[in-house]
Image: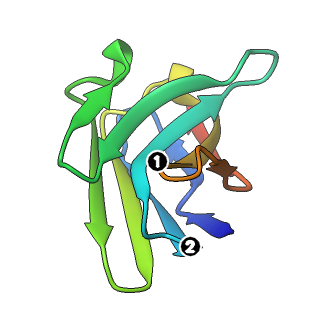
Amino acid sequence: QVQLVESGGGLVQAGGSLTLSCVASGSIFSLSIMEWHRQAPGEQREFVALASSSGRENYKDSVKGRFTISRADALNTVTVSLQMTSLKFDDTAVYYCRARDSRTGADYWGQGTQVTVSS
């Protein structure tokens, strides 16, 4: 089992910055992919960014150049952060961390953290 704990959400004005963090613990040894997703009110959950254990990164087009994902693998934890700059009203959503286990095929999700961008 893997536990994911997210932090860093909040209220920010348009144009501002926030950094989200997600710490994975437990059976972390084969967490090949760590992702951030988000879900705005009334919308489906959507992919935002990923970081693989091999160093690959990928971003949703609308956040490229504004968001940066980073990953740190330690002995007992994996931490993935999402640095968000030049925030827009449309970035308002609950942001979720997702961990994908390449050995078991399991998916794990965090509880979500609210990001609200005021216009």
Q: How far apart are marks 1 and 2 (CA)?
A: 12 Å
Is there any visible trace of residue 109 in the rendered image? yes
Direction front: furthest residue: 103
SS for tag 2? Answer: loop
Q: Where is residue 32 in the image (x, y as percent from the top left)?
A: 38, 51
| Mark 2 lies on residue | 27
Give the image location of residue 14, x and y in percent: 44, 32
Q: Between 44 and 102, which is closer to the camera in this rendering?
A: 102
Helix, strand or loop at mark 1: loop
- Asked if the residue under mark 2 is in contact with the one under mark 1, i.e. CB atoms within 8 Å, the reply is no
Q: In this picture, is 17 found above or below 78?
A: above
| Disc 1: CA contacts within 10 A as few (<14), some (14-19) or many (>=20) | few
Q: Quadrant of the N terminus?
A: bottom right
Image-quadrant location for residue 79: bottom left
Residue type, numbered disc 2: Ser
7 left or right of 61 in image: right
Nearer the observer, 69 or 66: 69
Q: In this view, does 41 lie to the left or right of 9?
A: right
Q: In the image, is 22 to the left or to the right of 62?
A: right
Q: Residue at x 74, y 55 (%)?
A: 111
Left or right: residue 48 compared with residue 15? right
Q: Which amino acid does label 1 sit on?
A: Ser
Q: Which residue lies furthest to the right in this view?
A: 42
Q: Which of marks 1 and 2 is nearer the N terminus?
A: 2
In percent of the image, x 43 and y 48: which residue is there? 34
Q: How crowded is mark 2: few (under 14 residues within 10 Å), some or many (20 or more)?
A: few
Give the residue drawn at x 30%, y 46%.
52
The quadrant in which the C terminus is found is top right
* Residue at the disc numbered 1: 102
Estimate the x, y position of residue 62 in percent, counting from the top left. Answer: 36, 15
Q: Please provide percent x and percent y for residue 17.
A: 36, 47
